[in-house]
Image (cartoon, grey):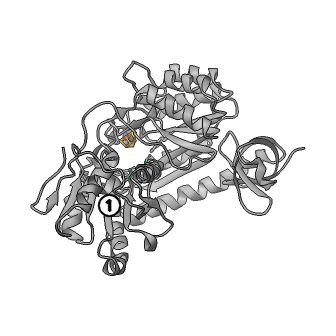
Amino acid sequence: MNEMSSENLQSPDSLKPVNHDIGAGRGVFISTYGCQMNVNDSERMYSILEMSNFMPVESAEEASLIIINSCSVREKPVHKVYSEVGTYRELKKKNPDLLIGVGGCVGQQEKEKLIKTQPLIDFVFGTDAIDELPQTLQTLLGRQSKKEKVVNAQFHHREPYHVDTLVRNPGVSTFVNITKGCDNFCTFCVVPFTRGREKSRPFQHIMTDIHSLVKRGVKEVTLVGQNVNSYKSDCGIDFPDLLKKVALETGLERLRFTTSHPKDYNQKLMDVLALCQHKLCDYVHLPFQSGNTRILERMNRGYTREEYLEKIRQIKATIPNVVLSTDIIVGFPGETEEEFLDTVSMVKEVGFETIFAFKYSPRPFTKAARFEDQIDEVTKSRRLNHLFDVHNKLSFEWVKKYEGQTLQILVDKAEGENKLSGRSTQNKVTYFEGPESLVGQTVPVKIHKALPNVLRGVIEQ
Ligand code: 5AD
Ligand code: SF4
């Protein structure tokens, strides 16, 4: 199950019982970058390590264990990892017992290569090895020489997907994993290679987690996975069934989900969205990536521009006042100027209030990285800037509609003396004045200023 690819590489012996005091009060610091899945994985790492008596600390300086949990979806993160590890050189000199590990997509992708090129790293673990961190650390703490390293980056091909730990400090609003990995193989995307085949968590585990989160004061849950709407549980429950059960059978106030794939947005899902509107928020994130059908085909997205637009029409008809957001890639190999302009027109036509747009970046193992008609960086940057300019102007106009409206805001944070922030059902961050005691409650706020990313208002008495 584990890798032993060089003489110095140890295998964490997961058959050995774990000593639950291996942490012995040592400080652990996790440096995280990347998507929400990664942030969530770091929270899980903290909770599983806390169970083995490691103590979360606020900075690398206070830690005896440093983990870099990094993402490789869009950037060249390996360099980032090396430069971050380099900054810990002095700490390691001062404390030779300091353990440094690299996890997440970069660990999965690079495996022992990381250790070969950066001797400061003691261990590497993949996206399926989080729950085995205590075993990995037990192996390291018992090693004879500091030259012995551990690499645990094999995928488990077993179904279902198990998440044995809950988020640490769930707060008012939190994330619950429902799937891991992806089988879609969009030609630009590294996820199928870094997170493996798609696996779903057992339905009962998800329900138990959510019931317990509700007891801990959570009001809003976002169900997360690379591709949530292809969820399929052990007992035949699909995503619309799951959504309906979570919406109707738990005490949550609000329910969200991300990310969905347009090709799996079917009628059954639309029907549940209509049925559970009081819980499901009027905000949908649906990546379209490109507004041009030829590029969509080269991306292996499985839908045309028209089919995407048809889904949007159905969503708008099902959820009144729905707010839409999306992911976009510009400068995909072979994209002509006209094809890029189809993407710009899609943004205008649908009226996405929020866009997450990126320059195409070739990722290892992916098909598109081998396409010969790559677009130069200058063109990619120009297209991205143009898209943002167009969107910016429009979104300032679009959000003006909120001024004068009263929105229901779930208060998630106190931001200082009598200052609060929260989010509307449409996922708009909203600032207003009020006492800290309102955190966790939903309050009506009359909006007086609306900018594309924030709203400001006053509590309506
Ligand atoms: N280049 C640029 N953007 C990418 N994304 C995924 N892979 C790449 C890549 N190779 C973007 C997509 C996806 C989001 C999470 O990241 O838009 O939806
Ligand atoms: Fe990547 Fe496509 Fe899967 Fe999303 S659906 S994770 S873009 S392969």
Amino acid type of the residue that numbered disc 1 sits on in the rendered structure: Val
Residue that carries the numbered disc 1 in the rendered image: 102
Q: Is residue 2 visible?
A: yes
- Where is residue 168 shown, x and y percent of the image? 51, 49
* SS type, badge 1: strand
- The residue at the point 62 percent across, 42 percent down is 351
Q: Position of residue 419 (x, y in %)?
A: 77, 58
Q: Quadrant of the C terminus?
A: top right
Q: Position of residue 98 (x, y in %)?
A: 33, 70
Whether residue 190 appears in this view of the structure is no
Vertical arrangement, residue 412 with respect to residue 359, above or below: above
Task: Report the residue at 77% width, 44% height from top.
Answer: 401
For image coordinates 53% across by 32% down, the residue present is 309
The N terminus is located in which quarter? top left
Horizontal side of 271 relative to 369 (left or right) equals: right
Seen in the picture, residue 221 relative to 451 is either above or below; the reply is: above
Q: Is residue 351 left or right of residue 430?
A: left
Residue 260, image x, y percentages? 47, 35
Nearer-the-camera pick, 277 or 350: 277
Left or right position of 145 against 54: left
User: Considering depth in this image, is 161 or 445 the residue closer to the camera?
Assistant: 161
Q: Nearer the viewer, residue 182 or 158?
A: 158
Label 1 packing within 10 angstroms: few (<14), some (14-19), many (20+): many
- Tell me the quadrant of ligand 2: top left
